[in-house]
Amino acid sequence: MVIAWHPQDIIAGIRKRGWTHRKIAEHLCLSRSTVTLSIKTGSSPIVRAFISELIGVPEAEMWPFRFPCGPEKRKRK
């Protein structure tokens, strides 16, 4: 069983790289609340992808509940 990252661990990874919720929101042209919610739930694919690249950890590792089949088994369109 894969355990999702705790939101505070994600936030710590973001801060270690010199970013904040506000800076990410401005960079992606989104609201801060969207970024905050996405950190907790992985709800926004755009935010998930950005944070994943920023921290250097696959999305499926941080938010495994968003990828029930695993990233390698997902069908690509």
Image (cartoon, rainbow, N blue to C red):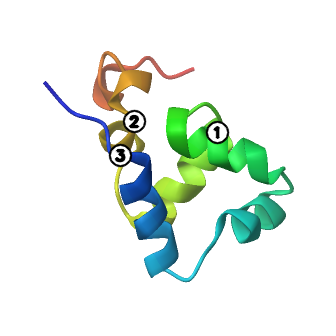
Horizontal side, residue 14 vs residue 35: left or right: left
Q: Is residue 64 above or below residue 11?
A: above
* Residue 62 % position (x, y): 36, 44
Of the 4 image quadrants, the one containing the C terminus is: top right
Q: Earlier in the sequence, mark 1 or mark 3?
A: 3
Q: Earlier in the sequence, mark 2 or mark 3?
A: 3
Report how far apart the C-alphas of labels 2 and 3 lie in the structure.
9 Å
For residue 63, the mark is: 2
User: Can you identify the residue that label 1 sits on?
Assistant: 37
Please tell me which residue lies in front, 6 or 75: 6
Q: Amino acid at mark 1?
A: Leu
Q: Earlier in the sequence, mark 2 or mark 1?
A: 1
User: Can you identify the residue that label 3 sits on?
Assistant: 6
Residues packed near mark 3 inside 10 Å, few (<14), some (14 to 19) or many (20 plus): few
SS class, disc 3 = loop
Q: Amino acid at mark 2?
A: Trp
Report how far apart the C-alphas of labels 1 and 3 lie in the structure.
13 Å
* Residue 63 % position (x, y): 39, 35
Which mark is in front, 2 or 1? 1
SS class, disc 1 = helix
